[in-house]
Amino acid sequence: MSMHVERRVLINTAVLGTGEVVGQLANFAFVVLLARTYGVEIFGWYSFAMALGAVLSVFVSVGGTGYVTRELAREPVRAQAIFEALRSVQVWSGLVVWLLIALTAVLSGVEPREGFVIVIVGAYHVLLRMAALFLAPTTARQRPLASAVAGGGHRILVAVLAAIAIVLGLDAPTTLLAMPFAALLALLAARAHSGPEMAAAAAIEPVNRATVIRASLPFLGAALLAVVYSRGGLLLLTAMKGEIATGLFAVADRLLVPIYMVTAVLATALLPALAMLEADRARMRELARRCLRLVLLASVPLCAMLAIFSTEIVTLLFGPELRPAATTLAMLAPLPVLRSITSLWSTQCIAIRDERRVALAKTRATVAFFILAAIGIGLAGATGLAIACVASEAYLALGLRAMLAGHSLYEPTWRVALGPVIAALAAAAVATTVTTMALPLRLLLVVGVMAVVLLLLGGVRLHDLRFLDRIMRGDATPDPARRTISRIGE
């Protein structure tokens, strides 16, 4: 089949991924500095504020970012008018959301320093959500450079300004002011990049705002469920066990964020391509299968390494004070693998206009998550929450699998994951037998075992390498016979 779509997805993923990797490295340095400088309690409140802001800021764009992205890929002229309608709505919704966050800080009864942390981090989330709408046109047109620059650039700025504040000996709230400042610059840059063009086009064909908001509600529901599902556990953990337990869980979760970001970036790049292939289910299924195979080939070994060396990683980066987070990290390690599966499957369902059933599946998974989380936190604190996260994500994957099977889009995942999983288990078994070995040698041995097992089991397949080679060379017309043989072999 033509490699144009696949090549575009890979290029977009690489562009977005580069921005995310650079930005996440800077953000990770910022988080480590924050935890080491101000202690686990402030880091716990920062993590709580990040979770609260992520949940409430979903209402800023009322689900419009995902809706506009999809419609711009399908009907650009009409979607430009939709963009303009949502742009005016989110100014007021953003103000309301920030006031709700401030009210939460006041009513929570925390000390003024912790309250300012919550309010400042909340403003950061609101401004980022507003910027995301202005970046939707570039995403829909599969030109993601602006998103990559804004995403990575604002995180670098946060890290630089925060480091300066820490060196100057400023307190935590003052240091965290770097976050909304950088987000405001990102918003202004995104608005300057996309706003005038969209506004000019919208003047040709205005649309009713109430109609646009109603059409966005399924996307709002899906986004809200996703963020409550991913962040609600931290809010519950803070309420049940306090900010120290929250800080321990946040350390483990923070170490997994780069893997989450790669999956999210791929899903963002994949949605427009899948939407354009809605009428060709065979090509859609093949594209999704290839992307899932590549994601699992990267995420399974990485998560296994985090689990095997959890104690060493946490101690090295965050210090002995936060070493108890290593157990939580080991329990949480399978989560990025499961999320890579559910993220891509959700993207497929949304591309074929089945977002309502996606929202329903996520609702069921969210209910299951909170039931399991309440039990897990009560029994084992942060580690119990980690187990609940993994179990509920597996439940969500089963629901999405049933949906794809109903559309004849499901491909057996075990065939894709078998090689990486066996390689990870073999590496873990070897690691447990050489615990007295020096860490550098142990690391090399574990990585070597994992790589050898992957190659022996065919985890890295020749036709996958050919696939990547054709994408990079831009070969748009592979031999039809080879294509048929490739499909049968897969």
Image: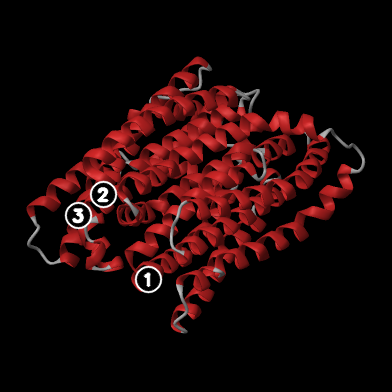
The residue shown at (89%, 49%) is 200
The residue shown at (23%, 55%) is 326
Between disc 3 and disc 1, the foreground one is 1
The residue shown at (22%, 57%) is 324
The three-letter code of the residue at mark 2 reads: Thr
Which residue, given by chain and number where applicable, does mark 3 sit on? Answer: 446
**Residue 209 visible (yes or no):** yes
Residue farthest to the bottom, as pictured: 168
Q: Which of disc 3 and disc 2 is earlier in sequence?
A: 2
Question: Dot 1: few (<14), some (14–19), or many (≥20) neighbours within 10 Å?
Answer: few
Q: Secondary structure at mark 2?
A: helix
The three-letter code of the residue at mark 3 reads: Val
Viewer-side residue, 321 vs 23: 321
Tell me the number on the disc at residue 182. none
Residue farthest to the right, as pictured: 204
**What's the distance in space between the residues labelled 2 and 3, CA to CA?**
21 Å
The residue shown at (91%, 43%) is 203
**What's the distance in space between the residues labelled 2 and 1, CA to CA?**
22 Å
Q: Is residue 118 above or below residue 164?
A: above
The three-letter code of the residue at mark 1 reads: Tyr
Q: Which of disc 1 and disc 2 is earlier in sequence?
A: 1
Q: Which of disc 1 and disc 3 is earlier in sequence?
A: 1
Which residue, given by chain and number where applicable, does mark 1 sit on? Answer: 38
CB under 8 Å between discs 3 and 1: no
Question: Dot 3: few (<14), some (14–19), or many (≥20) neighbours within 10 Å?
Answer: many
**What's the distance in space between the residues labelled 3 and 1, CA to CA?**
35 Å
Residue 318: x %, y % from top left: 30, 66
Which residue, given by chain and number where applicable, does mark 2 sit on? Answer: 328
